[in-house]
Amino acid sequence: MGIWSRMERWAEDGNEATVAVVGAGFVGRGLVHRLERSPGMRPALIVNRTVARAVSAYDAARGGAERVVVSDDADELDDAIAARVPAVTASFDVIEDLQGIDVVVEATGAIDEGADVVLRALESGKHVVSMNAEVDATIGHLIHSVAASTGSIYTISDGDQPGVLLRHIEFVRGLGFEIAVALNCKRNLDVHQTPESGRAYAARDSTSELMTTAFGDGTKMNIENAVVANLTGLVPDRRGMHGVRTSLSTVVGDLLQVLSRTGVVDYTLGGDFAAGVGVIAHTDDP
């Protein structure tokens, strides 16, 4: 039984997971929209420093929210959650006191606030799904230790690059292959990109100028590959990796020509497969 069928069965049996989405940016807004249309889950709370953006996320997901409760009081928020009324708070501190939330999704991309939210949620017995590769790369070992001590689940998300690449690695290993290279694929790279020079890209993608700079200058990609390396043992062939400009038809030869060994993480630039992830694998078994 696949995940979607299991979710449908879960909902048919009268179950529902109440989800708090932390961050109402590009990823958070998309997640709220998706959760509204997924069986067995409900975006019960949005946590965001700018309340108006959180309310707007509900409006976009629901085609206009009839009523939204805005409060920084845990009891008021719990009452709204129990009554199935969309709730919004600007307080990150209130999460640990909420009784009506089952799962917290961290989607801010901020290291300090993200780490605080994840640890508070786990310590209060809530499950955590993180779309914050920055936090995982920085204190992932601590987070896993806290989750183990409280019996809560901590996981990164299948949907962001590290999670998708890890799923792909698992699938390819399950076919009987050894991983030669786990790849993060980028369209382009400008290590000198600034918020000013990347402003047009930020406007195009509805992302913040600072985050867009991290995407364009390679910071985000390096963090994502660090997460994959930590979890799989596929370490870079050299500091900073190679970064090979290639295409789908030549990628195997182009990469193996520059790598000194296999079992590594690296990245590609350009190519007809553009952005995404990929795996090159091998076996001696005929």
Image: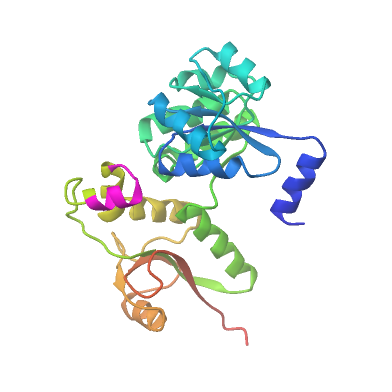
Residue 129 can be seen in this image: no
**Which quadrant is home to the C terminus?**
bottom right
Asked if residue 262 lies left or right of residue 77, the reply is left
Asked if residue 152 lies left or right of residue 274, the reply is right
Q: Residue at x 41, y 36 (%)?
A: 108
Quarter of the rendering containing residue 276: bottom left
* Image location (x, y in percent) of residue 23: 44, 34
Q: Main secondary structure of the magenta part?
A: helix
146 or 253, nearer to the observer: 253
Quarter of the rendering containing residue 100: top right
**Which quadrant is home to the N terminus?**
bottom right
* Image location (x, y in percent) of residue 27: 45, 44
* Image location (x, y in percent) of residue 101: 62, 26
Above or below for 199 versus 277: above
- Please tell me whether residue 186 belongs to the stretch shown in magenta: no
* Image location (x, y in percent) of residue 95: 53, 22
**Magenta residues, start to end:** 200-208
Above or below for 98 versus 140: above
Q: Residue at x 52, y 33 (%)?
A: 58
262 or 48, nearer to the observer: 48
Colouring scheme applied when the structure was drawn: rainbow
127 or 63, nearer to the observer: 63
- Please tell me whether residue 207 belongs to the stretch shown in magenta: yes
Q: Residue at x 68, y 34 (%)?
A: 17
